[in-house]
Image: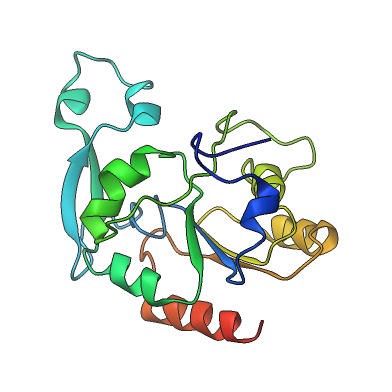
C-alpha cells in the first residue's frame, strides 16, 4: 500500500536507503502551539489555512478569515537536513507540509509524506491514532519519530512489533524542538 504521492517509492524501495527515517510532526515539534502567549525566541508567526483545519471552521468566521496561527523557526530546516536521516512528514498537514511548512523552515525539497486516511480515529488498543500507520509505512526500517502526542503505550507497542530499532521522541508542544532534541536525534542515529 502506497502512503505517499504517486511517485513515492513503495515500502520495499524505501528500505534501500541506508539512512534511518526521521518522521516529523508539525504541530508540537515544529510549531510549539502550546506556547500560547509568548512566541519562542527565533520563531516567526505565520497564518495558514491547512485543509484539516479549515474543514472544522465556519467559513464566515473571524477565525477562518485570519487563518491558523503557526509559529515556525526558519533555521529548523537546515538543522533537520544536517542530521543523518531521511526526513519524512508524519503530520495531519500531509502534503500541505511541503507547500507551507517546508519553505517557512528552510526546507527547499519536497519530503515524502505519510498519508493518514482516518485523522484522529480512536485506536481499539488505546494507541496514538498515527502509530499503526507509521509502522506500516516504515516497513521494518529504522526510524526516529518526533511528535508531541506519543505515549508510553506507543513506545511499548513499537518496541514489541517493529522488527528493527526505533526512537520515539516526545516533544513538549510549549517548547517545540530544542537543542537537546537535535542532539538526541544525532546521538541515536550514530548508534545504528
Residue 36 visible here = no
Taking the image as shown, residue 46 lies to the left or right of residue 6, namely: left
Which image quadrant: the N terminus? Answer: top right
Depicted 161 relative to depicted 183: above or below: above
Determine which quarter of the picture holds residue 10. Answer: top right
Judging depth in this view, the residue of 6 and 106 nearest the camera is: 6
Residue 88 x, y percent position in the rendering: 49, 55
- At 79% from the left and 64% from the top, the residue drawn is 159
Taking the image as shown, residue 6 lies to the left or right of residue 14, namely: left
- At 59% from the left and 81% from the top, the residue drawn is 188
Depicted 82 relative to depicted 100: above or below: below
Which image quadrant: the C terminus? Answer: bottom right
Q: How is the image coloured?
A: rainbow
Residue 100 x, y percent position in the rendering: 26, 44
Residue 180 visible here = yes
Residue 51 x, y percent position in the rendering: 35, 27
Judging depth in this view, the residue of 20 and 175 nearest the camera is: 20
Amino acid at each position: 500500500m502506497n502512503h505517499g504521492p504517486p511517485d513515492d517509492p513503495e515500502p520495499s524501495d524505501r528500505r534501500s536507503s541506508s539512512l534511518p527515517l526521521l518522521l516529523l510532526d508539525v504541530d508540537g515539534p515544529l510549531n510549539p502551539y502550546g506556547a500560547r502567549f509568548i512566541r519562542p525566541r527565533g520563531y516567526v508567526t505565520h497564518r495558514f489555512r491547512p485543509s484539516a483545519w479549515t474543514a472544522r471552521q465556519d467559513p464566515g468566521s473571524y477565525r477562518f478569515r485570519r487563518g491558523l496561527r503557526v509559529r515556525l523557526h526558519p533555521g529548523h530546516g537546515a538543522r533537520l537536513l544536517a542530521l543523518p536521516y531521511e526526513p519524512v512528514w508524519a503530520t495531519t498537514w500531509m502534503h500541505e507540509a511541503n507547500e507551507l511548512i517546508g519553505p517557512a523552515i528552510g526546507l527547499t525539497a519536497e519530503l515524502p509524506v505519510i498519508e493518514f486516511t482516518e485523522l484522529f480515529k480512536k485506536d481499539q488498543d488505546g494507541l496514538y491514532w498515527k502509530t499503526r500507520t507509521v509502522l506500516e509505512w516504515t516497513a521494518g526500517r529504522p526510524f526516529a519519530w518526533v511528535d508531541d502526542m506519543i505515549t508510553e503505550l506507543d513506545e511499548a507497542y513499537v518496541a514489541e512489533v517493529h522488527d528493527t530499532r526505533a526512537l520515539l521522541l516526545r516533544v513538549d508542544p510549549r517548547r517545540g524542538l530544542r537543542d537537546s532534541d537535535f542532539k538526541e536525534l544525532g546521538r541515536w542515529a550514530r548508534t545504528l
